[in-house]
Each structure stands twice: as C-alpha cells, then as structure tokens.
Amino acid sequence: MDFKDTIIALATPSGVGAIGVIRLSGEEAIRLTNEVFFPKDLSKQASHTIHYGRIEAHGNVYDEVLVSLFIGPHSYTKEHVIEISCHGSPFIQERIIQLFVEKGARLAKPGEFTQRAFMHGAFDLAQAEAVADVIAADSLAAQQAALHQLRGGFSKELALLREQLIHFASLIELELDFGEEDVEFADRKDLEALVSALLTAINPLVDSFKTGNAIRNGVATVIVGKPNAGKSTLLNALLNEERAIVSDIAGTTRDSLEDQWTLGGIKFRLVDTAGLRETEDVIEAMGVERTQAWVKKAQVVLYMVDAIQESTASLREALDKLGSLEIPLLLILNKVDQISAEALATWRSEWPDMVFISAKNKVGLADLEQALLDQVGIHHVSSNATLVTNVRHYQHLLQTQTTLLSVLSGLQKGLTGDLIAQELRYALHDLGEITGHISNDDLLKNIFGKFCIGK
C-alpha cells in the first residue's frame, strides 16, 4: 500500500442525510482542496480550524461546504487531513469525490485511514482494532471495553510484560554469545520469579476472554423447557413487546426465535426455542432438534418449568435427558401465582437456587435478571477494566501463557540457555503480534480489510 498517495472517501454512511463528510489524507490533501475551495487559501490557515466556502470547478459550484483543516502530524493519520462537510445528497457527495479523483486523489481502501495512523505510530495494532470495536459497540459494556482498549489500557499492560521479558531474553542471548566461557548473565532464580510474575499477570487476561467475548458479541441465552412452560411468554416479557406468538396449544413454537436484549449494559442474545418433547410431528421434531443444537452452543440456558404441569421428580427426569451441561443452567419455575403455598414451599426446599416467576403477570422478573447476571458472571463493567474481547488477542495470549509455562518448567528442570532462549523468543513474538510490534502484510490486510471505508 502506497502511503505517498492522497486518499479520499466518504466518512459518513451512504444515503440521503442532512450532511455528509468527505475525508482526505495525504501530502497533497491541502493543495488539492485549495484548487477547488473558495474563497480562502487553506495553506495560510492554522491547524484545527473550520472554514466556510464553496467547492467550485469548471465554472460550476458543486456545493457550499465547511472544511475542517488538520495539519500533519497533528491529525488522526499523522498526515495532512481535510474533512469536507457537504449537504447529504449522494449525488453531491459523489460529484465532489469524483472531482478530487480527477485532481489526483485516490479512493481509499477499507480501513486505510486507520492503517495510516497505525503505520505512522499514532497507536498500536490493538488500539487500531479497538477503533472498529467502538464503531460496532451496541451496548454500554461493549463501548466501555472498546474505549479502554482504544485509550491504550490493554496495550500498556502488554508493553510492561514485554519489556520485562525482553530484558531477561537479551541476557540469555548474551550468554549464548559467550557459550564457550560458561558465564551466566541471567540469574535463573530471578528469571523463574519473573516468568511466574508474568503468568500471574497474563492468566487473568486469558480468563477475561469469556467475559470480554460475551460483552463484544452478546451472551447467547437459550430458553428451553417442555411445551407450554411459558418460554415465549417470558421472551415477550423480557423484551417488553409481543415478539413471539403465545398460545395454549402445545407446540406453537416450532422454530427458534432470536432477539437482542440489554441488561445492565450487557447485550444478551435471547433465543426462544421449540418445546423439548418426543413428537411424531415432523416439523415439530425438527424444531426440537434445533433446540438441542442451540443448547450446545449457548453460553447460558434458561430452563423453564411449568409449576402446574410438572413436579420435582419430572424435572429431575427431564434434566437427566437433557444431559450434563458444561454451561451455566438457570432453573425458572413459571406460573407460581397458580399453585398453593405448600407446593411452592416444596419447590423451594428441593430447588433452592430456582427463580420463581409469573411470566404472564411479569412477577419476579427483577429476581430473574439479577440471577441471570450472577449466573453469567458479568456485572457492571468498569471503564478501567481490562478485558480481552478479540479472538486474535486471546489466541496469542493463550500461546504466550503456554510458552511461559514451558519456560518455567524448563528452568525448574535445568534446561540449557539455548532452549530457554528459543522459548522466550516465541513468547516475545506472540506478545508482539498483538500490538503490532511484529506484523506482516497479510495480517494487516486481514485486520484493516474488515473496517468500513472512510475509517
């Protein structure tokens, strides 16, 4: 990718709107704009200023605009940046962009503005990826996690780990240069203590991915149970709208129905499923199969129990058929307003962790919401919390963790310096891949190619 070109793109969503913002970046951004912007000479203006005028060429006025001027390196890309705010007509936007292309600008590729910022040292790769996460954030927790990473919170922790590791790795490498003299520059006990400390720092980051991934992509929450347990009624109650068809006829829900729901700043992907039962109805049987498939990929399962139709014994039998789940399971007793106090007491004594609700009357939903947050293990996310939300970061951290465990084991077994040095190189490489200290063209193309054009 040639960073000497001046690039241009629409930075706002395409379509009709009040305004559109066209962004240019590059050495010639100011000069090219000066050729078509009147009446001011932008080359004589201060950085971070806005100027009113018109885009004019070939004797035609294209539009009246506001031009924002950012003189490099004090800009997003560290280059000269011009942002033209024009009217939101797609026709006008296209004409202005085409005019600049005729003058010598090049259409920007996806993520090229952010990639230039990264290449010019405005931020590291982890922060660059956070830009896309901020744009895609659809919940408070996702926004806070992305902003923390964008501000460099995650990168600072990694940089500190890497610096400490580089110090000892360099001493080990130095020993190899003096291998014939049998000298030891890196104290093995100190190195062992350092690796243990690094693992103590990395382990919580690795463990945070479960939470971070759920915050970024939403918690897959599947509602299951026998027919007429009130699954669809619960979905409607939580969403506060008639999203699913509710009927007294068993087997009304024959396919999975998914919708998003935000609780405590966390996004949940609620899935209403077909009732779990044996049936000769081909269509209903397919729905039951899909329910079982959803259960396998869920992050939490809400198991609905009909307080009228079921007993504690039938529940145990149903859970045995469902099989052992390695994911959180939250038991919900529905229709508690229609059973006696004695029956309710029996349920409470045998299933103390069960949540008691009436989905139809919206009773007990607050208890269910709190229990759901407790079960998933996600509560209020601090804006200063460091969470791993990116699969690529998680994979490299996991590999670093594995390598450091190998180094620790090698030190305890008295392995030679050359083998330890090799393992340390692997660990440094994986940490460097996260922040972009070590990168390749294919990696950058894959990352920035997923960005929207204009960012």
Image (cartoon, rainbow, N blue to C red):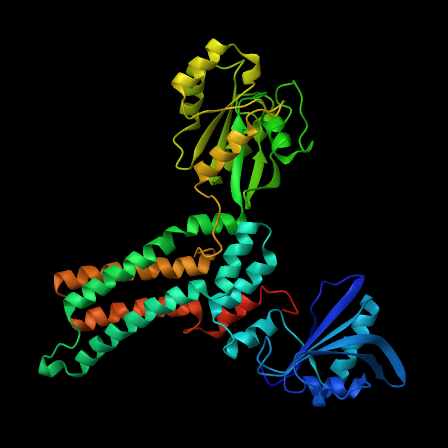
Report whether 116 appears left or right of 202. Answer: right
Q: Is residue 166 left or right of residue 391?
A: left
Residue 283 in view (yes/no): no
133 lies above or below 260:
below
Residue 146, visible in the rendered structure? yes
Q: Residue furthest right?
A: 59
Could you tell me how many numbered marks the image carries?
0
Q: In which quadrant of the rendered view does residue 238 lie? A: top right
Q: Position of residue 367 (x, y in %)?
A: 51, 30
Quadrant housing the N terminus: bottom right
Q: Nearer the viewer, residue 369 or 268?
A: 369
Q: Where in the figure is residue 264, as x and y percent of width and height?
A: 54, 43
> Residue 26: x, y in percent?
63, 83
Would you say 238 lies left or right of 145 here?
Answer: right
Q: Is residue 145 above or below residue 428?
A: above
Q: Measuring 60% from the left and 86% from the top, which residue is drawn there?
A: 4
Nearer to the camera, 86 or 381: 381
